[in-house]
């Protein structure tokens, strides 16, 4: 007991301020990584690696030499395996380092107007049975996707969004991207998700929305012409069948406009 107390005293005496900073930095990195992989397939892969780690410990304890040899060879190359398995998550993490602010130089009132116009457009499109894919850029830039589309520099307007997605429009087949509170491009093509656990009944638009949000922190609205429904996709996760109030609330929360949402609902009640 005395030895333990002495060891603790020695540890406290040798503890430096930089050690505290070091621990906080490591904690912050782990916290950000967990946020980054939240609700993605990376969680399942981490669980699988955890099971293999437990199996490795058991193989040592139970003297299962063949299993231990196989797992030991596996963990020797763990770094390469992690890079291969988590390439999308690593790409998103690196992109976060050079993140761009959402709605640069746009006031909270203007942000609210932008969100309301997007909601209005999505509801009208759903009622008209017109499919649409509306991407709202957040911190991670979407320049690669803007470049392959038709560049537009316009205020966010429900009528314009509807005009872009009508069937006879030359740029209706693709995604519309909103950046900094303005419509930046249309007819943009997005990467399809490769997640094998995705519902097979989901169409191309939903798969593209999931694929983009697996790689970036964008928020994507998907309007389905088949069932006249509106979905929001964030972090590879779909929130389906949203009516207008829920759609507004979800977008307000996504962009930290909760106070504006409370004020608007209070004014209408």
Image (cartoon, rainbow, N blue to C red):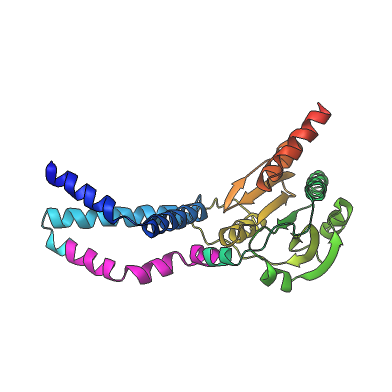
- Can residue 226 be seen here? yes
Count of all numbered marks drawn on residues in the image: 0
**Which residue is the extreme one toward the bottom?**
147
Snapshot quadrant of residue 57: bottom left
**Which residue is the extreme one toward the left?**
63
Residue segment shown in magenta: 68-92
Above or below, 247 against 25 in this view is: above
**Relative side of 193 to 10, left or right:** right
Above or below, 90 against 246 in this view is: below
Q: Where is residue 200 in the image (x, y as percent from the top left)?
A: 55, 52
Q: Where is residue 83 in the image (x, y as percent from the top left)?
A: 42, 69
Snapshot quadrant of residue 100: bottom right
**Which residue is the extreme one toward the front?**
13
Above or below, 17 against 80 in this view is: above
Q: Where is residue 151 in the image (x, y as percent from the top left)?
A: 80, 70
Residue located 75% across and 70% down the image: 149
Residue 207 drawn in magenta: no
């Amino acid at each position: 007991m005395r030895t333990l107390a002495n060891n603790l005293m020695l540890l406290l005496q040798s503890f430096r301020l930089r050690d505290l900073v070091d621990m906080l930095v490591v904690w912050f990195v782990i916290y950000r990584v967990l946020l980054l992989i939240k609700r993605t397939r990376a969680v399942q892969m981490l669980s699988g690696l955890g099971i293999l780690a437990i199996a490795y410990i058991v193989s040592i304890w139970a003297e299962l030499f063949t299993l231990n040899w196989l797992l030991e060879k596996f963990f020797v190359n763990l770094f390469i395996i992690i890079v291969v398995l988590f390439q999308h998550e690593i790409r998103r993490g690196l992109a976060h380092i050079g993140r761009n602010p959402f709605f640069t130089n746009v006031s909270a009132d203007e942000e609210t107007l932008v969100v309301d116009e997007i909601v209005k457009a999505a509801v009208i499109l759903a009622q008209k049975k017109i499919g649409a894919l509306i991407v709202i850029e957040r911190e991670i830039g979407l320049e690669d996707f803007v470049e392959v589309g038709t560049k537009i520099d316009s205020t966010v307007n429900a009528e314009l969004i509807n005009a872009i997605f009508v069937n006879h429009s030359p740029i209706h087949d693709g995604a519309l991207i909103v950046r900094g509170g303005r419509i930046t491009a249309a007819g943009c093509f997005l990467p399809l998700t490769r997640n094998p656990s995705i519902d097979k009944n989901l169409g191309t638009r939903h798969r593209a929305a999931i694929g983009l949000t697996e790689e970036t922190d964008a928020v994507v609205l998907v309007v389905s012409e088949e069932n006249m429904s509106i979905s929001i996709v964030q972090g590879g996760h779909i929130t389906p069948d949203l009516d207008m109030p829920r759609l507004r609330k979800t977008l307000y929360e996504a962009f930290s406009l909760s106070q504006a949402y409370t004020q608007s609902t209070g004014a209408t009640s």
